[in-house]
Amino acid sequence: MKFLISTANYNSEEYTKEFLASINNFAMENKKHKYTVQVFDNSATIGNVATYEYIDAHIIKPKRNIGLAPSWKISINTAKENDFDVLVLVNNDTIFSDNFFDIVSSAVENDPSSAYGPFITLENHSPWSTGGNFGFLPWIVKHEANSRGSYVHAIFETKHLSGCCIILPVQLLRDNENIYKGLSDFFFRGEEWFINKKLEMEGVNRYILRDSTLIHKENGSHSRFSEAHIYWAVRAKMLFIKKLNGFEHFLSLLTYSIHLFSKGLLFYKKNSSLSLNMTFCTILRAFCHGLKKSVIREFDF
């Protein structure tokens, strides 16, 4: 089976090089499949990389930081236009288990019309993500992280795949263009909510592959509660809400607005080094931009 693996680098070149080396080592041991890797170097910090004998690695250097969602869209088009079977959208701070691609291959061969995610753990093997679901209000996503033993079946249904790793059969992408239409409007954050919501709207099943493990290292490529993080988080949520339809849109915008300027404000203030006034101003600016703009780009901040 031919895999296209897509990841992005942003000030995390050591993780990216380790990621590429690990896939190359994996491919050396498992020649059953073919592996092509696209790395979007959004911070232009990757220098010379080793030549990899067992994978086809491409370091793509955009002229600016295009963000995560546009890189996903480019990889989707690459997968569709070439002879690939599966697209794996994955973070660069991850390690695939030895049987990862065999299990994915088997699942996709059996059902190429569904989307998949792996069982994601931290380096200490504790569960990090086993799927999730949208709440009554779609802007609230409930993540699950249950033990492997709590799942009887090797493949179990979920309503939300973690953006850390989303596995898309290329046949699914060719048959359902609506799944990713509008995806590249996002920048950083929000793309996983959007694509999961699109999969739901198109009636596409999503499954977690219990025995296909991905280890997530959680790198520090961005400051989690910096001013920029708060801005991008609010913008992403506003754009996601903007893409909802009818009553869902109205109710989500109303409830998120109330939440953002009450509990959200206190949460961001508590978990950042910003003053209350600076936190409020950052949220307000992102909120106003979110009302006016339908596309998120780096220069907005």
Image: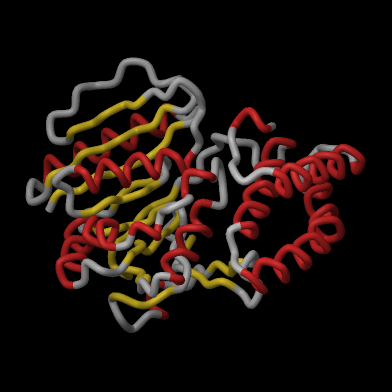
- Compared across the picture, whether 251 is left or right of 135 comes to right
At a point 15% along the width and 49% down the height, the residue shown is 2
At horizontal 27% and vertical 39% (from top left) the residue drawn is: 22
Render colour scheme = secondary structure
Query: Residue lying furthest bottom in this view?
Result: 152
Q: Which residue is the extreme one toward the front?
A: 246
Residue farthest to the right, as pictured = 277
The quarter of the image holding the C terminus is top right
Q: Quadrant of residue 5?
A: top left
Given the current orientation, which residue lies at the most extreme left position?
A: 32
At 39% from the left and 54% from the top, the residue drawn is 165
Q: Position of residue 34 (x, y in %)?
A: 13, 44
In this orientation, does residue 127 appear? no
Q: Nearer the viewer, residue 124 or 51?
A: 51
Compared to 87, does 223 lie above or below?
A: above
Q: Position of residue 6 (x, y in %)?
A: 33, 42
The answer, for residue 50, to whether it is visible in the render is yes
Q: Is residue 261 left or right of residue 233?
A: right
Q: Is residue 34 left or right of residue 122?
A: left
Callout count: 0
Q: Residue 103 is drawn in which quadrant?
A: bottom left
Residue 143 picture location, percent across and down:
55, 67
The one nearer the camera, 157 or 244, is: 244
Q: Residue at (32%, 47%) from the top-left corner?
A: 76
From the viewer's perspective, tell me whether residue 187 is left or right of residue 22: right
Q: Which percent across, then down, holds residue 139?
A: 64, 64
